[in-house]
Amino acid sequence: MIVDFAPQTEQSQSCATQWLSQAGLRPTRQRLTLAALVMGDGQNRHVTAEGLYAAALECGEKVSLATVYNTLRAFRDADLLNEITVDASRSYFDTRTDDHPHFFWEETQTLSDAPSEELEFRRLPATPDGCEVARVDVVIRLRRAS
Amino acid sequence: MIVDFAPQTEQSQSCATQWLSQAGLRPTRQRLTLAALVMGDGQNRHVTAEGLYAAALECGEKVSLATVYNTLRAFRDADLLNEITVDASRSYFDTRTDDHPHFFWEETQTLSDAPSEELEFRRLPATPDGCEVARVDVVIRLRRAS
DNA sequence: CTATGTGCAAATCTTTTGCAGGCTA
DNA sequence: TAGCCTGCAAAAGATTTGCACATAG
């Protein structure tokens, strides 16, 4: 998987510090690096644990894969990231934490945001009694036009 | 996971035979049993490999878990079943093969069909150039009302 | 008879966990 | 200093695969 992360800068690091303390997470070296990589330039990104791990190693950071998993989980629990389920075998994490639709390219197994303002429901199935809607996941699976 | 399968009958078995040959799959003993369990009474069902394996054992069939996995995969490849992704750690297979929305109870990790006639889009995000929509997955995640 | 399917165990792959040592507040 | 973090290796699940044997057409 090709992931395109922003280069590390002092600014992205200080931004990451705020981000972490805001969520009550200690700003350790590894977390700062991972946070800066993930939300670096303010662009929305969709990362997998493996992809982020590769990116961290590539920029010279010494992290273990287990820590990447633990950190992603911590970020998700702190609502800094959203976990998206599109593929039964891999978890994707999204820097956008609101409920919005996704495109998933089956060919490259790549996930991206779909413009949420272009999605509107005319009608949604009635929610069964005693339940409420936690979230509505919409994944638009794309393939190359035939 | 509680799964409620139809009892095996001669009728469901002969029905299963047709399904298999129609899809070009050899009607072996194991496949017949699994097909009858899955599509048994014509009701839509959502099964996991483990759940189907348990059901097969329970009705006295001698099958291995690996065969259940292989068979589910074969059924899916033959378009007899649809694979649904709602939970990153488990695959669900649906006897309804058309594109339709699902309810997912987070509490019990249970999947069920949502009435598809109650789902209507007013607008769907524009498909990027050179692509076409393979499928639109809609999962309505439910939690107990607070 | 030949190609497929099956069973078992072992391999894979992703993710989590236990524990000893390190670092932040 | 106290408690949270990290790294490593090992565990845990779900799923796939290799190979010898069985079986449908």
Image (cartoon, coloured by chain):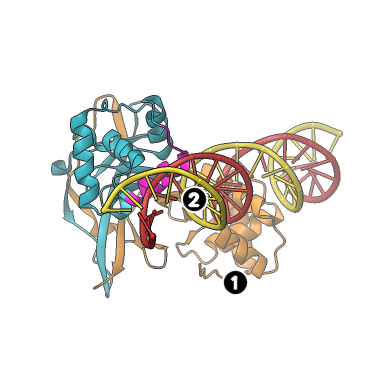
Chain colours: A orange, B cyan, C red, D yellow
Residue B106 forms part of the magenta stretch: no
Q: Is residue A116 left or right of residue D4?
A: left
Q: What span is colored magenta in the figure?
A: B62-74
Q: Quadrant of the C terminus of chain B?
A: top left
Q: Could you tell me the amino acid type at mark 1?
A: Pro
Q: Main secondary structure of the magenta part?
A: helix
Q: Give the vertical position of B95 relative to A51 (above or below).
A: above
Q: Could you tell me the amino acid type at mark 2?
A: Leu
In x, y percent, where is residue B134? 26, 61
Chain containing the residue with disc 1: A
In x, y percent, where is residue B42? 18, 35
Residue B66 forms part of the magenta stretch: yes
Q: Which residue is mark 1?
A: A7
Mark 2 and mark 1 lie on one chain; the one further toward the N terminus is 1
Chain containing the residue with disc 2: A
Work out how far the residue at label 2 is from the one at label 1, CA to CA, in angstroms.
20 Å
Q: Give the vertical position of B54 relative to A135 (above or below).
A: above
In x, y percent, where is residue D3? 73, 34
Q: Residues within 10 Å of mark 1 (few under 14, many from 20)?
A: few
B123 or B89: nearer the viewer: B89
Q: Is residue B119 left or right of residue B6?
A: left
Residue A131 placement: quadrant: top left
A127 or C13: nearer the viewer: C13
Residue B30: give its label.
none
In x, y percent, where is residue B114? 22, 38
Q: Which residue is mark 2?
A: A81
B7 or A15: nearer the viewer: B7
